[in-house]
Image (cartoon, rainbow, N blue to C red):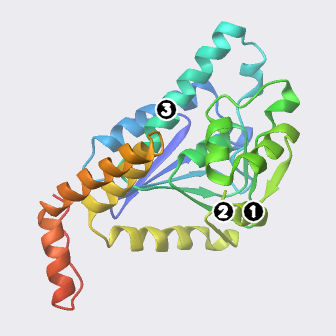
């Protein structure tokens, strides 16, 4: 499938999706969100894709926000539908059972911050800037920002950032848990690659089960979430991957996991 606003590249089982609107600082318009939805569907159904990296084109922005010219034309009904569409796309991304890393290479504001938060891990260049400045437009975040931000960094910190609309530096993002790692811009690709190498060396079924347990369990009470964990633990125990992993440990060698 060809895209106008995304660049897709595959290497070693890792699919890199680059938001490719550098002249607009990679702002998310409706067409780009629709392309992201199609790209996520491709990933979910492609067994050759083991992990995903999402980044932005150019050196200034990951995604600098939504396309304000589109927002300005929305009425209340259209605005709600606009938000629901974006939320659904980001939720599908979040619920992938393949690891997704945001390589945040600049501004991640508004919808860009929301996209980064929907990824499983966020690696930020030292020049990255996060924020949810929607209140400055007379709006609130519409793609899940009011829900994911407090889940990541806590209610009080999230409210302060949401209510002021201020920017958050990469170093602050690291300190509050919004970013997992901060590195120099020139090292971003290497650092992301190192994390994925470590993740993909593990049992793929177990990696997928971790993602499922966390993503689904966060929406459950503790008792139901622990039951889900136990169920997935049992499923893993029935797999050849578990047998290989435990056998390799006992034999003091590296496991050789099969992905099929």
Q: Are marks 1 and 2 in contact (CB under 8 Å)?
A: yes
Mark number, residue 151: none
Q: In the rendered view of the protein, which quadrant contains the C terminus?
A: bottom left
**Distance CA(mark 3)–CA(mark 2):** 22 Å
**Distance CA(mark 1)–CA(mark 3):** 25 Å
Is 165 displayed left or right of 71 in the figure?
Answer: right
Q: Is residue 3 visible?
A: no
Q: Are marks 1 and 3 in contact (CB under 8 Å)?
A: no
Q: Which residue is mark 2?
A: 124
Q: Residue at x 21, y 89 (%)?
A: 253
Q: Which residue is mark 3?
A: 89
Q: Position of residue 92 (x, y in %)?
A: 43, 36
Is the residue marked by circle 3 packed among few (<14), some (14-19), or many (20+) residues within 10 Å? many
Q: Secondary structure at mark 1?
A: helix
**Distance CA(mark 1)–CA(mark 2):** 6 Å
Q: Position of residue 181 (x, y in %)?
A: 62, 68
Q: Position of residue 110 (x, y in %)?
A: 72, 38
């Amino acid at each position: 499938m060809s895209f106008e606003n995304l660049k897709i590249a595959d290497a070693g089982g890792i699919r890199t999706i680059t938001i490719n609107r550098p002249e607009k600082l990679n702002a998310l318009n409706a067409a780009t969100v629709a392309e992201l939805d199609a790209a996520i569907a491709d990933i979910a159904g492609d067994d050759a894709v083991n992990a995903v990296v999402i980044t932005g084109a150019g050196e200034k922005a990951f995604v600098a926000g939504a396309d304000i010219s589109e927002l300005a034309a929305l009425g209340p009904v259209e605005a709600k539908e606009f938000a629901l569409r974006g939320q659904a796309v980001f939720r599908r991304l979040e619920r992938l059972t393949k690891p997704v890393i945001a390589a945040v290479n600049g501004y991640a504001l508004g919808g860009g911050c929301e996209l980064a938060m929907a990824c499983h891990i966020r690696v930020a260049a030292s020049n990255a800037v996060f924020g949810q400045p929607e209140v400055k437009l007379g709006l609130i975040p519409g793609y899940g920002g009011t829900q994911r931000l407090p889940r990541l960094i806590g209610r009080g910190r999230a409210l302060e950032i949401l209510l002021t609309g201020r920017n958050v530096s990469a170093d602050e993002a690291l300190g509050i848990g919004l970013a997992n790692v901060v590195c120099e811009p020139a090292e971003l690709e290497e650092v992301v690659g190192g994390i994925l190498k470590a993740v993909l060396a593990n049992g793929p079924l177990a990696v997928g089960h971790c993602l499922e347990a966390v993503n689904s369990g966060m929406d459950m009470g503790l008792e139901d979430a622990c039951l889900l964990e136990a169920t997935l633990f049992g499923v893993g125990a029935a797999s050849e991957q578990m047998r290989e992993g435990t056998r390799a440990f006992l034999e003091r060698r590296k496991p050789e996991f099969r992905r099929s």
